[in-house]
Amino acid sequence: MPRLRVITLLLCLCAASLGVACQNKSPQRAVEAASAFAERQPRYMRSLPHTKVPEGLTDLRAETCGACHQAIYNEWKISTHARAWLDDAQFLAELEKSEKQGVAWMCMNCHTPLQNQLPKLVTGLKDGRVDQAIMVDNPAFDSALQKEAITCATCHVKDGVVLGPFGDTNSPHPVKKEPSLRTVEVCTQCHQAQARFDAVGLICVFNTGQEHQDSPQAAAGKICQDCHMPTVERPLWVGGTEPRTVRRHWFGGSLIPKKPEYAEELAAIAQHFPPGLSVKTQPLPKAVKPGQTVQVDLRIKNAEAGHYLPSGDPERFLRIQTRVVDAQGKALAEHIETIGIEYQWHPVVKKLSDNRLAPLEERMLSLSFKAPASGPLTVHVQASRWRINERNLAYHELEGKYVPGQSFFKDVHQIDVKK
Protein backbone atom coordinates (compact mmCIF):
# COMPACT_ATOMS: atom_id res chain seq x y z
CA MET A 1 0.00 0.00 0.00
CA PRO A 2 1.44 3.42 -0.92
CA ARG A 3 2.79 5.34 2.05
CA LEU A 4 0.53 8.34 1.40
CA ARG A 5 -2.56 6.12 1.38
CA VAL A 6 -1.52 4.47 4.67
CA ILE A 7 -1.07 7.85 6.33
CA THR A 8 -4.40 9.04 4.91
CA LEU A 9 -6.14 5.92 6.22
CA LEU A 10 -4.59 6.33 9.67
CA LEU A 11 -5.63 9.96 9.77
CA CYS A 12 -9.17 8.98 8.81
CA LEU A 13 -9.25 6.33 11.54
CA CYS A 14 -7.90 8.80 14.09
CA ALA A 15 -10.45 11.38 13.02
CA ALA A 16 -13.22 8.84 13.33
CA SER A 17 -11.94 7.80 16.75
CA LEU A 18 -11.72 11.40 17.91
CA GLY A 19 -15.18 12.02 16.55
CA VAL A 20 -16.60 9.18 18.63
CA ALA A 21 -14.75 10.44 21.68
CA CYS A 22 -16.11 13.91 21.15
CA GLN A 23 -19.59 12.54 20.62
CA ASN A 24 -19.31 10.55 23.85
CA LYS A 25 -18.47 13.75 25.66
CA SER A 26 -21.23 15.77 23.98
CA PRO A 27 -24.26 16.75 26.07
CA GLN A 28 -26.59 14.49 24.11
CA ARG A 29 -24.23 11.54 24.43
CA ALA A 30 -23.96 12.11 28.16
CA VAL A 31 -27.74 11.99 28.57
CA GLU A 32 -28.00 8.91 26.36
CA ALA A 33 -25.28 7.10 28.30
CA ALA A 34 -26.95 7.95 31.62
CA SER A 35 -30.32 6.82 30.31
CA ALA A 36 -28.86 3.55 29.06
CA PHE A 37 -27.29 2.92 32.48
CA ALA A 38 -30.53 3.79 34.27
CA GLU A 39 -32.59 1.37 32.21
CA ARG A 40 -30.53 -1.52 33.56
CA GLN A 41 -30.96 -0.56 37.21
CA PRO A 42 -33.74 -1.14 39.77
CA ARG A 43 -35.84 1.96 40.45
CA TYR A 44 -33.96 3.03 43.61
CA MET A 45 -30.70 3.14 41.63
CA ARG A 46 -31.90 5.35 38.81
CA SER A 47 -33.44 8.73 38.20
CA LEU A 48 -36.57 9.28 36.18
CA PRO A 49 -35.75 9.98 32.52
CA HIS A 50 -35.15 13.51 31.30
CA THR A 51 -38.35 15.13 30.10
CA LYS A 52 -38.78 18.17 27.94
CA VAL A 53 -41.12 20.99 28.94
CA PRO A 54 -44.63 20.36 27.58
CA GLU A 55 -45.80 22.76 24.89
CA GLY A 56 -47.79 25.60 26.41
CA LEU A 57 -45.68 25.68 29.60
CA THR A 58 -42.60 27.79 30.25
CA ASP A 59 -40.88 25.26 32.54
CA LEU A 60 -41.45 22.24 34.79
CA ARG A 61 -41.60 24.09 38.07
CA ALA A 62 -44.40 23.61 40.56
CA GLU A 63 -45.18 27.32 40.68
CA THR A 64 -45.92 27.22 36.96
CA CYS A 65 -48.34 24.35 37.50
CA GLY A 66 -49.84 26.21 40.45
CA ALA A 67 -50.91 29.13 38.28
CA CYS A 68 -53.87 26.99 37.22
CA HIS A 69 -53.88 24.19 39.82
CA GLN A 70 -53.68 26.49 42.84
CA ALA A 71 -55.34 24.23 45.42
CA ILE A 72 -53.08 21.30 44.59
CA TYR A 73 -50.02 23.54 44.53
CA ASN A 74 -50.81 25.00 47.96
CA GLU A 75 -51.21 21.49 49.38
CA TRP A 76 -47.97 20.27 47.83
CA LYS A 77 -46.03 23.26 49.20
CA ILE A 78 -46.42 22.06 52.80
CA SER A 79 -45.96 18.38 52.01
CA THR A 80 -43.08 16.11 52.97
CA HIS A 81 -42.47 15.63 49.24
CA ALA A 82 -41.80 19.33 48.71
CA ARG A 83 -39.48 19.35 51.73
CA ALA A 84 -37.49 16.21 50.98
CA TRP A 85 -34.34 18.06 49.95
CA LEU A 86 -32.98 21.30 51.45
CA ASP A 87 -35.66 21.45 54.15
CA ASP A 88 -34.80 18.01 55.54
CA ALA A 89 -31.89 18.50 57.93
CA GLN A 90 -31.69 14.82 58.90
CA PHE A 91 -31.51 13.74 55.27
CA LEU A 92 -28.84 16.33 54.50
CA ALA A 93 -26.77 15.07 57.44
CA GLU A 94 -27.08 11.51 56.18
CA LEU A 95 -26.35 12.67 52.63
CA GLU A 96 -23.09 14.26 53.72
CA LYS A 97 -22.03 10.92 55.15
CA SER A 98 -23.14 9.17 51.96
CA GLU A 99 -21.11 11.59 49.84
CA LYS A 100 -17.97 10.60 51.71
CA GLN A 101 -18.81 6.96 50.94
CA GLY A 102 -19.46 7.78 47.27
CA VAL A 103 -23.07 6.54 47.32
CA ALA A 104 -25.02 9.80 47.62
CA TRP A 105 -26.12 9.53 43.99
CA MET A 106 -28.45 6.67 44.96
CA CYS A 107 -30.14 8.74 47.69
CA MET A 108 -30.91 11.51 45.22
CA ASN A 109 -32.84 9.16 42.95
CA CYS A 110 -35.78 9.41 45.33
CA HIS A 111 -35.27 12.84 46.92
CA THR A 112 -34.74 14.69 43.62
CA PRO A 113 -36.03 12.02 41.22
CA LEU A 114 -36.01 13.76 37.84
CA GLN A 115 -32.91 13.59 35.69
CA ASN A 116 -33.48 17.32 35.10
CA GLN A 117 -32.81 17.86 38.84
CA LEU A 118 -29.39 16.23 38.97
CA PRO A 119 -26.17 18.22 38.38
CA LYS A 120 -24.30 14.99 37.60
CA LEU A 121 -25.48 11.91 35.74
CA VAL A 122 -24.26 8.38 36.34
CA THR A 123 -23.20 6.54 33.19
CA GLY A 124 -21.70 3.43 34.81
CA LEU A 125 -20.00 1.87 37.82
CA LYS A 126 -16.27 1.23 37.96
CA ASP A 127 -15.74 -2.47 38.65
CA GLY A 128 -19.47 -2.69 39.38
CA ARG A 129 -19.07 -0.82 42.70
CA VAL A 130 -21.86 1.55 43.75
CA ASP A 131 -19.30 3.73 45.55
CA GLN A 132 -17.36 4.28 42.31
CA ALA A 133 -19.96 5.78 40.01
CA ILE A 134 -18.77 7.20 36.70
CA MET A 135 -20.35 10.63 36.36
CA VAL A 136 -20.69 13.33 33.74
CA ASP A 137 -22.09 16.84 33.91
CA ASN A 138 -25.81 17.08 33.20
CA PRO A 139 -26.32 19.59 30.36
CA ALA A 140 -30.02 19.93 31.24
CA PHE A 141 -29.58 20.47 34.99
CA ASP A 142 -32.18 22.85 36.43
CA SER A 143 -31.01 24.09 39.83
CA ALA A 144 -34.33 25.76 40.64
CA LEU A 145 -36.21 22.55 39.89
CA GLN A 146 -33.79 20.61 42.11
CA LYS A 147 -34.86 22.69 45.11
CA GLU A 148 -38.44 21.46 44.66
CA ALA A 149 -37.46 17.89 45.57
CA ILE A 150 -40.39 15.58 44.72
CA THR A 151 -42.25 18.02 42.53
CA CYS A 152 -45.30 17.98 40.25
CA ALA A 153 -43.34 16.73 37.24
CA THR A 154 -42.10 13.70 39.20
CA CYS A 155 -45.47 12.00 38.77
CA HIS A 156 -47.23 14.16 36.20
CA VAL A 157 -44.83 14.79 33.29
CA LYS A 158 -43.26 12.30 30.92
CA ASP A 159 -41.86 12.81 27.42
CA GLY A 160 -43.18 16.37 27.33
CA VAL A 161 -46.76 15.35 28.14
CA VAL A 162 -48.72 16.10 31.31
CA LEU A 163 -50.10 12.90 32.85
CA GLY A 164 -53.35 12.96 34.79
CA PRO A 165 -56.07 10.66 36.11
CA PHE A 166 -58.66 11.90 33.60
CA GLY A 167 -56.98 12.78 30.30
CA ASP A 168 -60.07 14.49 28.92
CA THR A 169 -59.42 18.10 29.90
CA ASN A 170 -59.19 21.03 27.50
CA SER A 171 -55.76 22.22 28.60
CA PRO A 172 -53.15 24.65 27.28
CA HIS A 173 -50.68 21.77 27.30
CA PRO A 174 -50.80 18.17 26.03
CA VAL A 175 -52.56 15.83 28.45
CA LYS A 176 -52.63 12.05 28.66
CA LYS A 177 -54.58 9.74 30.97
CA GLU A 178 -52.16 7.76 33.13
CA PRO A 179 -53.78 4.74 34.87
CA SER A 180 -50.74 4.14 37.11
CA LEU A 181 -51.59 7.30 39.06
CA ARG A 182 -54.46 5.31 40.56
CA THR A 183 -52.21 2.42 41.64
CA VAL A 184 -49.73 1.76 44.44
CA GLU A 185 -46.88 1.55 41.92
CA VAL A 186 -46.66 5.33 41.64
CA CYS A 187 -45.80 5.36 45.37
CA THR A 188 -43.73 2.21 45.69
CA GLN A 189 -41.26 3.34 43.04
CA CYS A 190 -39.62 5.16 45.97
CA HIS A 191 -41.26 3.62 49.04
CA GLN A 192 -40.07 0.10 48.22
CA ALA A 193 -36.30 -0.23 48.14
CA GLN A 194 -34.56 -3.16 49.75
CA ALA A 195 -30.96 -4.02 48.99
CA ARG A 196 -27.61 -4.71 50.66
CA PHE A 197 -24.29 -3.28 49.58
CA ASP A 198 -22.00 -4.92 52.12
CA ALA A 199 -18.82 -3.74 50.40
CA VAL A 200 -19.63 -0.20 51.49
CA GLY A 201 -21.65 -0.99 54.63
CA LEU A 202 -24.89 0.25 53.10
CA ILE A 203 -28.40 -1.18 53.20
CA CYS A 204 -31.74 0.05 51.91
CA VAL A 205 -34.59 -1.10 54.15
CA PHE A 206 -37.63 0.69 52.78
CA ASN A 207 -40.22 -2.08 52.65
CA THR A 208 -43.49 -0.16 52.95
CA GLY A 209 -44.72 -1.29 49.55
CA GLN A 210 -44.32 -4.98 50.39
CA GLU A 211 -45.84 -4.45 53.82
CA HIS A 212 -48.92 -2.95 52.19
CA GLN A 213 -49.10 -5.70 49.58
CA ASP A 214 -49.26 -8.28 52.39
CA SER A 215 -51.82 -6.32 54.43
CA PRO A 216 -55.56 -6.87 55.00
CA GLN A 217 -56.12 -3.41 53.54
CA ALA A 218 -54.55 -4.42 50.23
CA ALA A 219 -56.65 -7.59 50.20
CA ALA A 220 -59.71 -5.35 50.58
CA GLY A 221 -58.64 -3.25 47.59
CA LYS A 222 -57.20 -0.28 49.49
CA ILE A 223 -54.31 1.62 47.93
CA CYS A 224 -51.77 4.03 49.43
CA GLN A 225 -53.66 7.06 48.12
CA ASP A 226 -56.81 6.17 50.07
CA CYS A 227 -55.07 7.23 53.30
CA HIS A 228 -52.27 9.53 52.18
CA MET A 229 -54.18 11.44 49.47
CA PRO A 230 -57.79 11.78 50.69
CA THR A 231 -60.39 12.76 48.10
CA VAL A 232 -62.17 16.10 47.77
CA GLU A 233 -64.79 17.48 45.37
CA ARG A 234 -63.56 20.63 43.61
CA PRO A 235 -62.76 22.01 40.14
CA LEU A 236 -59.48 20.74 38.79
CA TRP A 237 -58.18 24.19 37.86
CA VAL A 238 -58.77 27.88 38.60
CA GLY A 239 -61.89 29.02 36.79
CA GLY A 240 -63.12 25.48 36.25
CA THR A 241 -66.84 25.06 36.84
CA GLU A 242 -67.12 21.28 36.91
CA PRO A 243 -66.32 19.80 40.35
CA ARG A 244 -64.44 16.52 40.16
CA THR A 245 -63.39 13.93 42.66
CA VAL A 246 -59.68 14.67 42.99
CA ARG A 247 -57.07 13.86 45.61
CA ARG A 248 -55.37 16.10 48.12
CA HIS A 249 -51.62 16.51 47.63
CA TRP A 250 -50.45 16.84 51.24
CA PHE A 251 -49.13 13.24 51.27
CA GLY A 252 -49.70 13.21 55.02
CA GLY A 253 -48.17 10.57 57.26
CA SER A 254 -46.73 11.16 60.71
CA LEU A 255 -47.05 14.95 60.26
CA ILE A 256 -43.82 15.50 62.16
CA PRO A 257 -42.63 18.85 60.77
CA LYS A 258 -39.23 19.00 59.13
CA LYS A 259 -38.58 22.31 60.88
CA PRO A 260 -40.13 23.84 64.02
CA GLU A 261 -41.68 26.66 61.98
CA TYR A 262 -43.69 24.15 59.91
CA ALA A 263 -45.60 22.79 62.91
CA GLU A 264 -48.60 25.12 62.74
CA GLU A 265 -49.49 24.49 59.10
CA LEU A 266 -49.23 20.73 59.55
CA ALA A 267 -51.40 20.86 62.67
CA ALA A 268 -54.10 22.47 60.50
CA ILE A 269 -54.39 19.35 58.34
CA ALA A 270 -54.14 16.77 61.14
CA GLN A 271 -57.88 16.11 60.99
CA HIS A 272 -57.36 14.43 57.61
CA PHE A 273 -54.68 12.05 58.90
CA PRO A 274 -55.59 10.18 62.09
CA PRO A 275 -52.67 8.54 63.92
CA GLY A 276 -52.00 5.03 62.73
CA LEU A 277 -51.70 3.84 66.33
CA SER A 278 -54.69 3.82 68.67
CA VAL A 279 -54.08 3.79 72.43
CA LYS A 280 -56.82 2.95 74.92
CA THR A 281 -56.41 2.95 78.68
CA GLN A 282 -58.44 0.09 80.09
CA PRO A 283 -60.91 0.94 82.92
CA LEU A 284 -59.17 1.87 86.17
CA PRO A 285 -60.62 1.82 89.70
CA LYS A 286 -61.79 5.16 91.02
CA ALA A 287 -60.37 4.34 94.46
CA VAL A 288 -57.96 1.80 95.98
CA LYS A 289 -56.72 0.90 99.45
CA PRO A 290 -53.19 1.60 100.75
CA GLY A 291 -50.82 -1.19 99.72
CA GLN A 292 -53.24 -2.52 97.10
CA THR A 293 -51.65 -3.69 93.86
CA VAL A 294 -52.95 -1.67 90.94
CA GLN A 295 -52.46 -2.63 87.29
CA VAL A 296 -52.65 -0.16 84.43
CA ASP A 297 -53.41 -1.82 81.09
CA LEU A 298 -53.08 -0.14 77.71
CA ARG A 299 -54.48 -1.66 74.56
CA ILE A 300 -52.52 -0.48 71.54
CA LYS A 301 -53.43 -1.26 67.92
CA ASN A 302 -52.19 -0.47 64.45
CA ALA A 303 -55.69 0.63 63.59
CA GLU A 304 -55.18 2.84 60.54
CA ALA A 305 -51.98 2.01 58.67
CA GLY A 306 -51.95 -0.52 55.84
CA HIS A 307 -48.30 -1.21 56.61
CA TYR A 308 -46.19 -1.80 59.71
CA LEU A 309 -45.96 0.90 62.37
CA PRO A 310 -43.60 2.57 62.09
CA SER A 311 -42.54 2.08 58.46
CA GLY A 312 -39.93 3.48 56.11
CA ASP A 313 -36.80 5.02 57.61
CA PRO A 314 -35.20 2.55 60.06
CA GLU A 315 -34.67 5.30 62.64
CA ARG A 316 -38.41 5.86 63.12
CA PHE A 317 -39.99 4.61 66.32
CA LEU A 318 -43.03 4.97 68.58
CA ARG A 319 -42.81 5.61 72.30
CA ILE A 320 -45.65 4.83 74.74
CA GLN A 321 -45.06 6.09 78.26
CA THR A 322 -47.14 5.19 81.32
CA ARG A 323 -46.33 7.08 84.51
CA VAL A 324 -47.95 7.05 87.95
CA VAL A 325 -47.29 9.93 90.38
CA ASP A 326 -48.43 10.59 93.94
CA ALA A 327 -50.05 13.71 95.37
CA GLN A 328 -46.65 15.47 95.55
CA GLY A 329 -45.82 14.61 91.94
CA LYS A 330 -43.28 11.96 92.85
CA ALA A 331 -43.10 9.06 90.43
CA LEU A 332 -44.32 5.76 91.86
CA ALA A 333 -43.97 3.70 88.72
CA GLU A 334 -43.12 4.19 85.08
CA HIS A 335 -42.98 2.09 81.93
CA ILE A 336 -41.70 3.20 78.52
CA GLU A 337 -42.40 0.97 75.53
CA THR A 338 -40.37 1.65 72.39
CA ILE A 339 -41.67 0.20 69.13
CA GLY A 340 -39.43 0.07 66.09
CA ILE A 341 -36.40 -1.63 64.55
CA GLU A 342 -32.95 -1.72 66.10
CA TYR A 343 -29.93 -2.13 63.85
CA GLN A 344 -26.27 -2.72 64.42
CA TRP A 345 -24.45 -0.47 61.97
CA HIS A 346 -20.81 -1.40 62.65
CA PRO A 347 -18.74 -3.36 61.89
CA VAL A 348 -21.41 -5.26 59.90
CA VAL A 349 -24.92 -4.00 59.30
CA LYS A 350 -27.57 -6.32 60.70
CA LYS A 351 -31.01 -6.16 62.25
CA LEU A 352 -30.99 -6.81 65.99
CA SER A 353 -34.70 -6.58 66.77
CA ASP A 354 -38.05 -5.62 65.28
CA ASN A 355 -41.15 -5.22 67.42
CA ARG A 356 -43.22 -3.07 65.07
CA LEU A 357 -46.96 -3.54 64.78
CA ALA A 358 -48.35 -5.29 61.70
CA PRO A 359 -51.52 -3.87 60.15
CA LEU A 360 -54.48 -4.31 62.57
CA GLU A 361 -52.22 -5.96 65.18
CA GLU A 362 -53.17 -5.39 68.84
CA ARG A 363 -51.08 -5.64 72.00
CA MET A 364 -51.57 -5.09 75.70
CA LEU A 365 -49.05 -3.08 77.71
CA SER A 366 -49.19 -3.33 81.50
CA LEU A 367 -47.75 -1.57 84.51
CA SER A 368 -48.25 -2.66 88.14
CA PHE A 369 -47.60 -0.73 91.36
CA LYS A 370 -48.61 -0.69 95.02
CA ALA A 371 -50.78 2.16 96.23
CA PRO A 372 -49.15 4.41 98.87
CA ALA A 373 -50.68 5.33 102.20
CA SER A 374 -52.48 8.35 100.82
CA GLY A 375 -53.58 9.85 97.56
CA PRO A 376 -54.71 10.92 95.16
CA LEU A 377 -52.67 9.17 92.43
CA THR A 378 -52.47 10.35 88.84
CA VAL A 379 -51.89 8.04 85.89
CA HIS A 380 -50.38 9.75 82.83
CA VAL A 381 -50.33 8.00 79.45
CA GLN A 382 -48.58 9.56 76.48
CA ALA A 383 -47.80 8.26 72.99
CA SER A 384 -45.36 9.92 70.62
CA ARG A 385 -43.83 9.24 67.22
CA TRP A 386 -40.22 9.92 66.29
CA ARG A 387 -38.07 10.35 63.19
CA ILE A 388 -34.79 10.20 65.09
CA ASN A 389 -33.78 9.58 68.69
CA GLU A 390 -32.23 12.20 70.95
CA ARG A 391 -28.76 10.62 70.78
CA ASN A 392 -28.58 10.76 66.98
CA LEU A 393 -30.12 14.23 66.96
CA ALA A 394 -27.17 15.42 69.05
CA TYR A 395 -24.69 13.42 66.95
CA HIS A 396 -25.81 15.21 63.79
CA GLU A 397 -25.91 18.58 65.64
CA LEU A 398 -29.57 19.06 64.73
CA GLU A 399 -30.90 20.41 68.05
CA GLY A 400 -33.20 23.35 67.32
CA LYS A 401 -32.95 22.79 63.56
CA TYR A 402 -35.09 19.70 63.32
CA VAL A 403 -38.16 18.26 65.05
CA PRO A 404 -37.23 14.74 66.20
CA GLY A 405 -40.70 13.70 67.32
CA GLN A 406 -44.10 14.76 68.57
CA SER A 407 -46.79 13.60 70.97
CA PHE A 408 -50.10 12.50 69.43
CA PHE A 409 -51.97 11.00 72.40
CA LYS A 410 -52.34 12.00 76.05
CA ASP A 411 -54.59 10.52 78.72
CA VAL A 412 -54.85 11.32 82.45
CA HIS A 413 -56.69 9.38 85.15
CA GLN A 414 -56.97 10.06 88.89
CA ILE A 415 -57.27 7.36 91.53
CA ASP A 416 -58.16 8.08 95.16
CA VAL A 417 -56.55 6.17 98.03
CA LYS A 418 -59.03 5.31 100.80
CA LYS A 419 -58.43 3.25 103.92
Image (cartoon, rainbow, N blue to C red):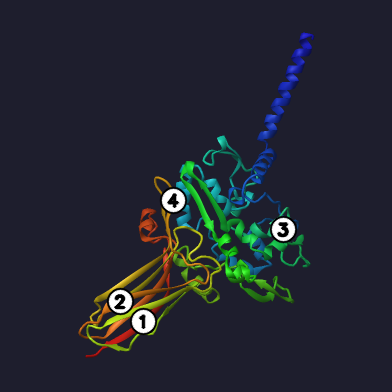
The amino acid marked with disc number 2 is Ser
Binning the other alpha carbons within 10 Å of mark 1 as few (below 14), some (14 to 19) or many (20 upward) gives few
The residue pinned by badge 4 equals 350
Q: CA distance from mark 3 to mark 2?
A: 65 Å
- For the residue labelled by badge 2, is the local secondary structure a helix, a strand or a loop? strand
Q: Residue at x 39, y 80 (%)?
A: 411
Which residue in the protein does label 1 denote? 412
- Precedes in sequence: disc 3 or disc 2: 3
Considering only order in the chain, which callout, 2 or 1, is on the residue closer to the N terminus?
A: 2
Q: Callout 3: helix, strand or loop?
A: loop
What residue is pinned by disc 3? Answer: 57
Dot 4 or dot 3: first in sequence order is: 3
Q: Earlier in the sequence, mark 4 or mark 1?
A: 4
**Marks 2 and 4, Cα distance to the nearest angstrom?**
35 Å
Res. 81 in view? no
Verify CB contact (< 8 Å) between mark 4 and mark 3.
no
Residue 156 location in percent, x, y? Answer: 68, 60
